[in-house]
Amino acid sequence: MNSPGGETSNAKDKRAQEAAEDRALIQLAQLGDLAAFRRLVERHQRRAFAVAVALVRNDDDAREIVQEAFLRAFKGLSRFQSDSAFFTWLYRIVTNLSIDHARRARGHTKAFQEDRLGTTEAEELEAPFLGHVDGADPLDALRRREIAARLQSAFDALPSYHQAVIVLRELEGLSYEEMAEALGVSKGTVMSRLFHARRKLQRALADCYEEQVGHASRIGISEADAQGER
């Protein structure tokens, strides 16, 4: 079994190898090798899309953001500094584009969320799974959905700079240093933002838990009263 320290070391080694391979591809792309840049796109488009869609909550908008990010990266290859990692440079572009888009579209967030809940993709991800698990408790499934909805609502209510650190840390597993580079801020700022963002999400889940406990208590009391009347 790998120790936590060993896993961290392996992750760093993997990132270092990836950065070295990216730099080799960038050098070729800077010389006009389009195939090398396409390889960069293939290596990072999935992760870039995951960051974008987590921030803008719309697949189509996320795809456009990722396309624009790679276009800007291609145009700015001559300015790329070899001592930086390509993926943190790219994530900075994706994150900034996503934050700008989210700010413009903030007034339409509620309408989009209501529409997203009814999509075929959401139904395929949730309903069949819940329906095919043997012995699945419908009430437990409902509670999990309520908690997920509350957590999503709390995330959507976060400022965009708090959303960004949650996505980069929890979804992509970036280090504080990588996040600082990707967001163009200091490591201390990243740590502060992450602390406050996590505390807000924990508070939202605590409120939801208290509601669930209170609801269960009320049901228990009601059932006891009903039995007493028999």
Image (cartoon, rainbow, N blue to C red):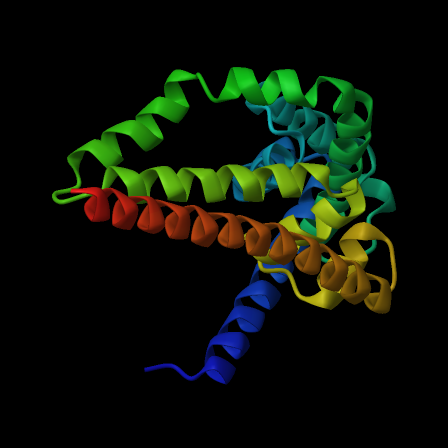
One can see residue 84 in this view: no
Q: Is residue 84 above or below residue 6?
A: above
Q: Is residue 1 visible?
A: yes
Residue 24 % position (x, y):
65, 54
User: Farthest left residue?
Assistant: 134
Residue lying at 38% horizontally and 81% vertically, measured from the top left: 2
| 49 or 204: nearer the viewer | 204
Residue 30: percent from left, percent from top = 76, 41
Which part of the image, by quadrant, shows the N terminus?
A: bottom left
Q: Which corner quadrant of the image does residue 170 belong to?
A: bottom right
Q: Is residue 49 above or below residue 63?
A: below
Q: Quadrant of residue 9?
A: bottom right
Pinpoint residue 202: horizontal percent, then vertical percent: 61, 57
Q: Quadrant of the C terminus?
A: top left
What residue appears at the point 27 percent right and 45 percent down from the top-left corner?
Answer: 223
Residue at x-position 81% and y-position 64%? 192
